[in-house]
Amino acid sequence: MELSKKDRVFLINQYSILAALNNDEASHYNELITILENGYEIYYSMVDQWISSDMPSEDGKFVINILDLYRAIENLKRKAKSEELENHHYSFFIGFDGNNETEYMSFARFLVEDQGKFREQEPYLRKNDNMNSHAPMIDTYKRMLDKANEIESIWEMSIEEAIEILEA
């Protein structure tokens, strides 16, 4: 990361304020101030280590699309009352792998918990370990979305079509 002197001054001021407001973290903020005051570029990564990389729009759309698919499945489960669908392993959104798909999991949590979207997922948060599948899911979800794109409308799908999607 490159920081101009102006950037460093701004950050030093911010960390000085934070150190004054938060005694428990003051030593950490003071360490960052020292790094910035002295231009220890080798440690600049400490300044931004808590900031995630950008999530590409396509990845965000992918998460929204899979949550939309699961919204349609929830609607179908309420209407159709199918034991086969209800008991299917993937009948509810199990999330993304916390170790390898963290940004996807975090975005899904943000959508449900922070933005209040896809509220139908809230009852599953305990069942799916707060959207941590503990196994890679992206490829499975891509196959499911590909299969869903073969039908006319996920909002009018049959139980059989939903099961085919879940088994993709």
Image (cartoon, helix red, strand yellow):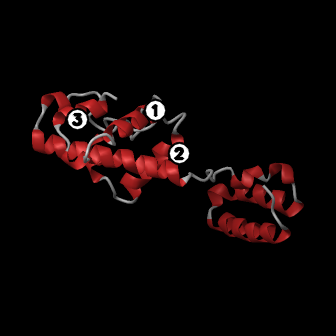
- Position of 26 with respect to 101 (left or right) is right
**Above or below, comparing residue 94 to residue 12 in the picture:** above
Residue at (11%, 44%) from the top-left corner?
A: 79
Q: Which amino acid does label 1 sit on?
A: Asp
Classify mark 2: helix, strand or loop.
helix
Local packing at callout 3 (Cα closer than 10 Å; few below 14, some 14-19, many 20+) is some
Residue at mark 1 to residue at mark 2: CA–CA distance:
15 Å
Local packing at callout 1 (Cα closer than 10 Å; few below 14, some 14-19, many 20+) is few
Badge 1 is on which residue? Answer: 139
Classify mark 1: helix, strand or loop.
helix
Q: In the rendered structure, which disc, 1 or 2, sits on the residue that comes first in sequence?
A: 2
**Along the line of sight, the residue nearer the viewer: 21 or 7:** 7
Badge 2 is on which residue? Answer: 103
- Position of 5 with respect to 49 (left or right) is right
Q: Do tag 1 and tag 2 residues touch (Cβ < 8 Å)? A: no
Displayed quadrant of residue 167: top left
x then y, percent, for residue 53: 63, 51
x then y, percent, for residue 89: 28, 27
Residue 109: mark: none
Residue at (75%, 50%) from the top-left corner?
A: 45
Residue at mark 3 to residue at mark 1: CA–CA distance:
19 Å
